[in-house]
Amino acid sequence: MLIETISVFPELFEPYLSASIMGRARRAGLFEFRAHDLRDWTHDRHRTVDDAPFGGGQGMLMKVEPIFEAVEAVSAEGPRPHVVFFSPCGRRFDQRAAERLSREDRLLFVCGRYEGMDERAYALADEVVSLGDYVLTGGELAALAVIDSVVRLLPGALGDEMSPVDESFSADAGLLEYAQYTRPASFRGMDVPEVLLSGDHARVAAWRRASAVERTARWRPDLLERASLTPEETELARRAREGA
Ligand code: SAM
């Protein structure tokens, strides 16, 4: 997979994408990364990428021409990329979107800054993504979050092929992940559930499923609308929601 970004702060990406799982996946050739500087597509001495909004108002907007030139030039360097823009007005990003993007061969992320972009720039977007209902200073952090969530789904990225399957929001379960513990088995009066120490795989699996239902009911009951639960699990979720 080829992943590219266009932004006015291309240097922000390298440290994160060189470290830990991202760095390992990159060195293993699971993805290639290129950060493009939007200012390379400006034509004035000051390499200007922003201007005041028509109609007045606070702050500056990213100009449409450099964005068009950049996206067109980068796109022409190979097979057509899937182009993603960022905005708090975009569609809320989730695990399903990460799974969908992980099947693309080439992704191009275009990051905003300032008060956002000239609206005409969005004509280039295959999709506009929001990380959530809050405002960041720039799209670079949003791009890194999306890149991270996509790369860890690439086969081999996590080492253990099963890891992404069990996780919260995975398309299979639609539930949050079950509670997990490591040593010590007892800490300040808080004991690990006995079943997890039993070595009985069937009981452990049943406990984990119940734990996932309970945690989802308590923390993200909205997710249960799409999950398929047995009548016993529905009752378990009801009791967890009521704090019983
Ligand atoms: N004035 C814009 C508004 O109110 O919608 C906010 C612009 S924000 C300060 C600058 C850039 O940060 C945006 O163009 C976008 O690229 C990025 N950004 C900010 N919040 C974001 C979010 N919740 N999700 C994704 N990108 C975001």
Image (cartoon, rainbow, N blue to C red):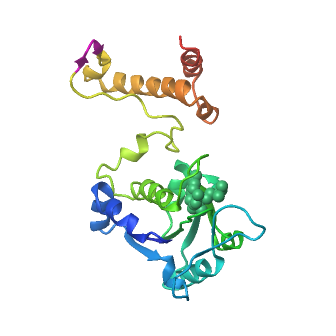
User: In which quarter of the view is residue 234 placed?
Assistant: top right
Counting from the top left corner in percent of width and height, residue 86 is at 58, 61
Give the farthest residue toward the right: 55
- The front one of 136 and 172 is 136
From what the image shows, is residue 180 above or below residue 6? above
Lateral position of residue 235 relative to residue 103, left or right: right
Residue for point 31% across, 69% down: 29
In the picture, which quadrant includes the N terminus?
Answer: bottom left
Lateral position of residue 50 relative to residue 23, left or right: right
Counting from the top left corner in percent of width and height, residue 84 is at 57, 66
Residue for point 29% across, 15% down: 191
- The front one of 64 and 218 is 64
Lateral position of residue 78 relative to residue 63, left or right: left
Q: Which residues are magenta?
A: 185-190
From what the image shows, is residue 237 above or below residue 141? above
Looking at the image, how many numbered discs can be counted on the residues?
A: 0
- Residue 101 within the magenta-colored segment of the rendering: no
Counting from the top left corner in percent of width and height, residue 15 is at 32, 62
Q: Is residue 28 visible?
A: no
From what the image shows, is residue 195 above or below residue 4? above
Counting from the top left corner in percent of width and height, residue 194 is at 29, 16
User: In which quarter of the view is residue 174 placed?
Assistant: top right
Q: Is residue 175 visible?
A: yes
